[in-house]
Image (spheres, coloured by chain):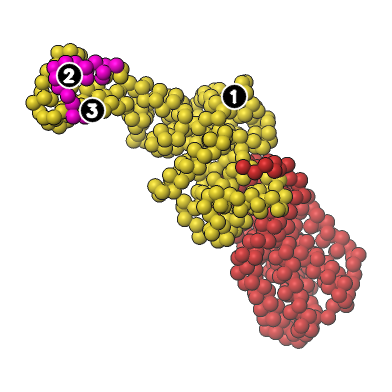
């Protein structure tokens, strides 16, 4: 037997270990990430060139409006992965092993969710580069662009906590991905991601204003235009932080208390 | 609580909604032994292990593991135990080596040591080549070996093995048995559950039979067998004529014993003590009958098991 008796790892080090695990998984099974990136690039091209002329007169004009929204079209469906991954851990025996080791128990959850930030970032970069390649030129320049991208990643991260909590209580990993699609696609299409709300009938405008994604998309546009301190931006940050403050502790508690 | 006791349980009750799984259960397991909890499917074995390894809360009773009271001192218990569950507790998407490094790091090994320890264990469990492949591709036996390896990265004081050989082929099973022996020799207390009598007989110093949520019998394998009390001497004779003479004699000497005939040249006599077998052989020698061969056997654990769980096998 080995003589080096280890000490309990710090919260930081056990979380880093779980982040390392997420990265290993991304590296050993990159299919989903490749697929998501291809879809991101393809839909950016499709939406711009198919609808650009009809919606905004020309693809080049439409892409100025579309790109910030397109980030969400790409990144929001990815927010269920974390919940599905947690659910998969729980449904196999790994979860039991993790729980009989005395490390800081929120680490596995944090590791999975932080690992997904990398995936959001890759998708967001794919969309943005495609957009810039076909003529997207934000007034805020590179700084505005970067802030907009960061907000998209932050919002995806915040939203993923809802599915993380859901994933912990779900019976099967598949059910998390399937049942969340209705919610996510409503949130995507019932918003101002693709077109200006002003062109729509009044009742649907009311509905759309209740969708936080609408305000986040608006904030992203403003950021990319260089309006860093608009009230939309502040509102967007409040939404993100509230989601995390509300759902992160719920997820930790549910995860800790889970009796399989 | 004494320092030599690994697990002490009094009046433990656990119910799942309507189903009462453990009923007022008492159990004491001393340190440094291999203990087997023997029972059929649904008897409460897994529930018991999950409670002792802090994975499951219980409703009432006292549970003490390695001198720590549960659930209050769960953290302390967790730092001293290790558990191999019935479900394979590995990450299927990672390689065998990555799995071990992962657990080693979570136990607090620094990078280099984690890697070294993983290598050491892969070698010990004959998995060096397989270590570079993803666990998804492993056979049942390899899964189980890696699983046990992961459980002893940091040598635990008490190791729980929940049905360690269920679903394994005979070869992998004997590999796992060898591992249990080896760990026990190094001083680890082992608490295993099994539905195989042979396994309990081969591995355990102490056995408790669990049935319907309570312990119905406990003791060493030998004690349990003698509880059922059936010892038998089987004598094979040179020919049928000698056997008939022998039977007459035995019936005269021990009128209460029935000498059963299995085959033409065989007698099988139930005895209560080994000394009776000696006197039977002596008497036979007195009338110049020399058995071709003889054997004395104890009741098998199967009989023990059936005696204590009789009538409940067809649930």
Number of numbered discs visible in the structure rendering: 3
Mark 2: secondary structure: helix
- Chain bearing tag 1 is B
The chain whose colour is red is A
1 or 2: tag closer to the N-terminus = 1
Instruction: Using the numbered discs, state the Cα–Cα distance from disc 1 to disc 2 in whole angstroms.
Output: 49 Å
Viewer-proximal residue among A15 and B23? A15
Viewer-proximal residue among A1 and A18? A1
Q: What mark, if any, has residue B294 been given in the picture?
A: 3
1 or 3: tag closer to the N-terminus = 1
Residue at x 26%, y 28% (from the top left corner) = B295
Q: What mark, if any, has residue B284 been given in the picture?
A: 2
Residue A68 in picture, x, y percent from top left: 78, 72
| Magenta-colored span | B275-294
Determine crowd level at label 3: few under 14, some 14-19, many 20+ residues with C-alpha closer than 10 A.
Answer: some
Residue at x 21%, y 29% (from the top left corner) = B293
Q: Where is mark 1, residue-wise?
A: B4
């Amino acid at each position: 037997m080995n003589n080096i008796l280890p000490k309990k790892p710090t919260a930081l080090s056990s979380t880093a270990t779980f982040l390392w695990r997420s990265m290993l998984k991304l590296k050993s099974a990159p299919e989903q990430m490749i697929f998501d990136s291809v879809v991101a690039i393809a839909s950016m091209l499709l939406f711009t060139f198919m609808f650009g002329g009809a919606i905004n007169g020309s693809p080049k004009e439409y892409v100025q409006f579309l790109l910030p929204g397109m980030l969400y079209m790409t990144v929001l469906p990815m927010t269920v992965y974390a919940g599905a991954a947690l659910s998969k851990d729980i449904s196999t025996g790994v979860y039991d092993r993790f729980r009989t080791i005395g490390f800081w128990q929120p680490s596995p959850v944090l590791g999975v969710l932080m690992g997904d930030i990398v995936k959001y970032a890759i998708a967001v970069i794919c969309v943005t580069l495609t957009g810039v390649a076909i003529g997207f030129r934000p007034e805020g320049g590179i700084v505005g662009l970067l802030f907009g991208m960061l907000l998209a990643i932050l919002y995806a991260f915040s939203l993923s906590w809802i599915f993380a909590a859901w994933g912990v209580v779900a019976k099967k990993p598949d059910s998390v991905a399937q049942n969340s699609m209705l919610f996510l696609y409503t949130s995507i299409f019932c918003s101002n991601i693709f077109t200006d709300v002003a062109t729509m009938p009044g009742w649907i405008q009311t509905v759309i204003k209740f969708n936080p994604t609408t305000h986040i998309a608006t904030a992203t546009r403003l950021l990319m235009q260089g309006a860093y301190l608009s009230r939309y931006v502040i509102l967007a940050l409040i939404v993100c932080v509230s989601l995390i403050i509300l759902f992160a502790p719920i997820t930790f508690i549910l995860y800790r208390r889970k009796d399989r | 609580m004494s320092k030599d006791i690994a697990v002490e349980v009094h009046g433990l009750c656990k119910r799942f909604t309507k189903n009462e799984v453990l009923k007022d259960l008492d159990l004491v397991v001393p340190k440094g032994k291999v203990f087997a909890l023997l029972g059929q499917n649904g008897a409460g074995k897994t529930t018991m292990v999950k409670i002792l390894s802090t994975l499951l809360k219980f409703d009432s009773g006292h549970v003490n593991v390695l001198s720590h009271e549960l659930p209050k001192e769960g953290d302390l218990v967790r730092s001293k135990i290790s558990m191999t569950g019935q479900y394979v507790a590995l990450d299927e998407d990672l390689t065998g080596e990555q799995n071990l490094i992962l657990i080693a790091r979570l136990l607090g090994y620094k990078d280099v040591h984690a890697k070294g320890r993983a290598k050491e264990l892969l070698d010990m469990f004959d998995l060096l080549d397989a270590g570079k492949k993803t666990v998804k591709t492993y056979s049942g036996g390899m899964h189980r070996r890696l699983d046990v390896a992961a459980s002893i990265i940091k040598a635990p004081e008490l190791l729980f093995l929940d049905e360690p050989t269920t679903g394994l082929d005979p070869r992998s099973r004997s590999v796992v048995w060898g591992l249990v022996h080896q760990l026990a020799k190094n001083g680890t207390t082992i608490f295993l559950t099994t539905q195989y009598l042979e396994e309990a007989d081969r591995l355990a110093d102490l056995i408790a039979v669990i049935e319907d949520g309570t312990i119905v019998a406990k003791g060493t394998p030998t004690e349990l067998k003698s509880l059922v009390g059936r010892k038998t001497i089987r004598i094979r004779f040179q020919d049928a004529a000698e056997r008939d003479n022998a039977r007459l004699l035995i019936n005269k000497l021990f009128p209460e014993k029935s000498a059963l005939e299995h085959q033409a040249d065989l007698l099988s006599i139930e005895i209560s003590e080994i000394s009776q077998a000696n006197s039977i052989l002596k008497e036979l020698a007195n009338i110049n009958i020399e058995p071709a061969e003889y054997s004395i056997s104890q009741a098998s654990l199967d009989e023990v098991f059936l005696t204590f769980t009789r009538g409940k096998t067809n649930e």
